[in-house]
Amino acid sequence: MGETASLSACPACAAAPLAQDRAARVMGPAQITLSVPGLHCAACMDKVERALQGQPGVRRARVNLTLKRAMIETEPGLTPADLIPFVEAAGYEAHELDAGSIAATATDRAGRDLLMRLAVAGFASMNVMLLSVSVWSGAEDATRDMFHWISAAIALPAIAFSGQPFFRSAWGALKAGRLNMDVPITLAILLALVTSVWETALSGEDAYFDAALTLTFFLLGGRYLDHRTRAVARSAAEELTALEVPRATVLRNGQEVLLPIAEVVVGDLIRLRPGARLPVDGEITEGHSELDRALLTGETLPVVAAPGQRVSAGEVNLTGPLTLRATAVGRDTSLHRMADLVALAESGRSRYTPLADRAARLYAPGVHILAALAFIGWLAWSGDARLALNIAASVLIITCPCALGLAVPAVTTAASGRLFRRGMLIKHETALERLAAVDTVVFDKTGTLTTGTPRLLNPEALSREDQALALGLAQGSSHPLSVAIRTALTGQVTPAAVTALREVPGFGTEAQWNGMTLRLGRAHWLGVEAGPQTATWLQSGRADPVELRFADSLREGAESTVAALRAQGRRVLLISGDSAGPVADLAKRLGIEDWQAGALPGDKAARIAALQAEGHKVLMVGDGLNDTAALTSADVSISPASALDAARVASDIVLLGGDLAPIPGALTTASRATARIRENFRIATLYNVIAVPLAVAGLCSPLIAALAMSASSITVSLNALRLR
Amino acid sequence: MDVLIWLIPISLFLGAVGLVAFVWSLRANQYDDPDGNSQRILSDQWDNHPQP
């Protein structure tokens, strides 16, 4: 608004910076990032780098194999569209990535920070361990004291730096009046340091500098594993978002300009080519076409679009060019309002307490009480505060949840890695635990069990001549039904050489052949009654129109997935927004007894809530905007990567490939991972049962503490590795 | 035990060198593409001409 006001007051001066701004954007960024999903080897990297480096205007190209991206520094003015053909000529699929969306993950600041602390703790613990081994093997008096002082000089600054993540987290929890795993960790580390310095100052025999440092090192290792698992998932999820570069063709002052969506304002006229997705909510002002709403409502049949009709963001324009006036942009579109609702519902997920926190809630008070009792007991028994404090500290060190801190991240890293290699991305930290409990699976139809692209059912209804005509006509349109005809008939017959081929937006295609008018399109355009099924009609000359029927094709792995889930004894349901005919058809094909058609978004969520009220744990698999409410209300949710952004945001797990087959395997992996986590907790408990009495009895020397701690950590990590 | 006067500082110094080397490699973005680095050693493209 402010912009238009200033424009009217002084058009030239307001336009100047705007023009510059626009020029800078047209010139393009000097850094272009392409996603090259096919990269997998040294030869691929060479080929892609060489293909890019040879081009004029490219200063430097470097491939990142981990992220499967090519980073290209260019002269200003080069656009990704100029470079993609070269990569494709080298034999690799390439997509532009939106620079704005991936900038956040370009450098992983938190990961680096953790790695640095891990390195410092590792360095310090190795050096201190060297000195400690000398003490354990019999260094005495002045030598021992000197070794202890050197250890202190290394350990104190190293822990002050490396331990910060735990200290901060523990302080945060205490301030909020809660207990988490970091509280006993922090207390143990600090108490170990205090008693060690005190002992050293009094030239005592035992110092726990090495224990405090190895503890920090192992725990940071767990923290880093945890971070990496989630960083990989996050960057892959952001890459999916970045693949959709949001731009719109806007009419400004009678000229078409390509603008980023963020700059489109209400009232702008937007041009939409066939095949483009609507970027904003609006009202059609010009043009006739058909719109594909499958992602929003689950309907498979396209709807007719004509001037005056209101349309919403996310729909796909199919047949004719459209002009629309934007009525809501950016965060106000119905698409985004839905996504915001999802974000609100997200907070519901945080009600789930992760296993580790539940363990900590039991564990932390127990440990602290035990240490306090040991202190009081020894103080009453011997009357020596120094001895009592020493023993309390060793109790805390030896019970410190080193194994507990590693138990969860080591297992989730192994499990997420395994699922990632099979094409599934775990986005949420507790998704695996929730997935393990699932007993009911709810599928959406369009776009989830089916691909959402129709398939021709009855090519044999046409004579060979008609097939040739149909193929000729279908070549004139990118309507999904035409595409389906092309897929079915190409190679079967040679297309008829039709002339004057034109698309009548909203109706079909029309052409001339041997003096006859041919038409392929909607039933009422050809003057026949439309049936219940997805169909198009072909009319040649004066003959009666022939019906061509279509059905959605099944997604790869749909049949085997449903069968495998049922074999695992889980209940499978199908809930779709589509009409009863196709839904019943699909349910019968897949052997799903429990299905519901014509479900509105609210109905889906309500059904899931009803299932949950019966005590079921529900997994929702869906891709559309109409599924988002259901995706968030389910216990855990999966969406394919082809889903709309809003649905991907709402789900816990994203399927990267087009195949549904990894789902049953993921359920098994999840329950095995949860079992492994519980097993790790049991190992940690068992080790405490053995070690704690020793510590309370005052028999726990620093050597035993170090051995016991490392042994338990390594056992837990190895146990997690068995999952691979 | 006189030898300790030399050995301890030397071991600490070597450890510190290792730590500094690690910090340098971390700052120089050497951990950004672990998969790529393990493949790049197989490439003969840069043998005689170090990569710019």
Image (spheres, rainbow, N blue to C red):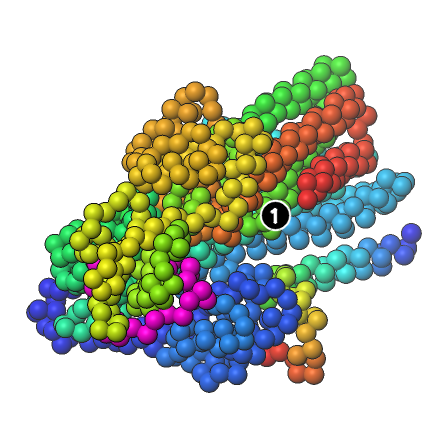
Number of on-image labels: 1
Q: Report whether A527 appears left or right of A463.
A: left
Asked if the stretch drawn in magenta spans residue A411, the answer is: no
Name which quarter of the figure residue A622 lies in.
Answer: top left
Asked if the stretch drawn in magenta spans residue A507, the answer is: yes
Residue beneath the point at 14% across and 62% down:
A286
Residue beneath the point at 81% across and 47% down:
A131
- Asked whether the viewer can see residue A272, the reply is no
Name the foreground residue: A315 vs A304: A304
Q: Position of residue A184 (x, y in %)?
A: 61, 31
Where's the N terminus of chain A, which quadrant? bottom left
Name the foreground residue: A29 vs A151: A29
Where's the C terminus of chain A, which quadrant? top right
Q: Report whether A713 appears left or right of A422.
A: right
Instruction: Tell me which amino acid carries mark 1.
Output: Gly
Q: Position of residue A512 (x, y in %)?
A: 24, 71
- Asked whether the viewer can see residue A239, the reply is yes
Residue beneath the point at 64% across and 31% down:
A675
The image shows residue A349, relative to residue A646, as above or below, that is above
- Residue beneath disc 1: A417
Q: Position of residue A517 (x, y in %)?
A: 21, 68
Secondary structure beneath dot 1 equals helix
Q: Report whether A660 appears left or right of B38.
A: left
Q: Residue furthest bottom?
A: A56
The image shows residue A168, relative to residue A66, as above or below, that is above
Name which quarter of the figure residue A680 lies in.
Answer: top right
The chain letter for the residue carrying disc 1 is: A
Q: Residue furthest top?
A: A380
Q: Position of residue A551 (x, y in %)?
A: 38, 48
- The span shown in magenta is A484-510
